[in-house]
Amino acid sequence: MTGGADVPLTVGIDVGGTNIRASVVDGEGEVLDTVTASTPRSARSLEDGLARVVRELCGRHPISGVGLAVAGFVDEDRATVRFAPHLPWEDAPVAQRLTDRLGLPVILEHDANAALWAEYRFGAAAGGRNVVLVAIGTGIGAALLTGGQLYRGSYGVAPELGHLQVVPNGRACPCGKRGCWERYCSGTALVDTALELLATDPQRSKVLARDALRDPGSLTGRRVAGAAQDGDPVAVEVMAEFARWLGLGLAFVSDLFDPDLIVVAGGVSSSAGLFLDEAREHYSASITGARHRRLARIRTAQLGEAAGMIGAAELARAALEVPQDAMPVSPGR
Ligand SMILES: [Zn+2]
């Protein structure tokens, strides 16, 4: 697709637990305008807030459609939010409610899927055929692209790679299970591993031990990565442990999907220089039959935090090209 006046502008919205960020995005994936607001607590006020930011952008640009990137389970019709742990929606027909208010077509997409679609169209996944994206932040968000199409599974929830169990009876996970991959390979895991190492020998890292003693909450993944950058021995060991789990997990995922490209996204990817080469070594050491197969390239994402918005806007634009009678939209109320 090429840009220009004939390509409609759409709005992509990242609906986070703390903030709503809405951007007007053109056909080249360029962000033209952005509005942010805090995320209201109730479903009705959230929908009011979303309608308000879209109307504000519609006042400045000719908008043809809206895409929402949602951290949660989105039905395969991309119109209903089944469950979102940080949002007040449960079995909510969000697309139809917003269409009723705005008079614009609205689609929903899982946030990692939206981010992968943006990277595929405009960023690090361009040219990939079968791509896995892992967005590593507080946990792991994951998305799959096969043959140039997002893979959503049979019921819209694939893939939950972050909750694959890698350690039987391992660290407890908020999902209710134990030993999930994201408990060992996330920003949260950097802190947990650091605290475990400090508990056995606090003297090894005066810097991190001081932080942890003064205020355990002050120790963040970013802080650990910064200390590793400065050569702190505990932080360096934490990053090595993280690299090992990233490589092992990606090998597991590759044994399942055999991708040609893996994109590492999310907040932790900004510290990729501290772990990615080592993760690649663990990856090729643990994948099945490494010497007899081509291995996926592993790259970092290019579009940063805007990826979800850009992808949602691009998916909304693609939906405009589908004949209206083929769209899964029920009659207005
Ligand atoms: Zn879990």
Image (cartoon, rainbow, N blue to C red):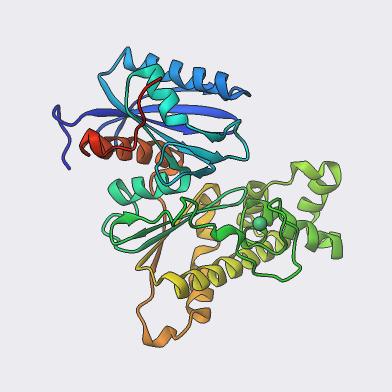
Instruction: List x then y, in percent, for residue 258.
Output: 39, 72
Question: In the displayed structure, does residue 182 sit left or right of residue 55?
Answer: right
Question: In the displayed structure, does residue 272 sit left or right of residue 9?
Answer: right
Q: Is residue 161 above or below residue 254?
A: above
Answer yes or no: is residue 34 visible: no
Instruction: List x then y, in percent, for residue 48.
Output: 50, 17
| Residue 3 found in image quarter | top left
Task: Tell me the quarter of the image containing the N terminus.
Answer: top left
Q: Nearer the viewer, residue 83 or 212?
A: 83
Instruction: List x then y, in percent, for residue 44.
Output: 56, 20
How many numbered circles are shown?
0
| Residue 87 found in image quarter | top right
Residue at x-position 36% and y-position 41%: 311
Instruction: List x then y, in percent, for residue 104.
Output: 32, 23
Task: Tell me the quarter of the image containing the C terminus.
Answer: top left
Question: In the displayed structure, does residue 24 sit left or right of residue 234?
Answer: left
Q: Nearer the viewer, residue 165 or 238?
A: 165
Residue at x-position 78% and y-position 58%: 205
Residue at x-position 37% and y-position 22%: 332
Residue at x-position 61% and y-position 59%: 163
In which of the image's four quarters is ligand 1 placed?
bottom right
Answer yes or no: is residue 99 visible: yes
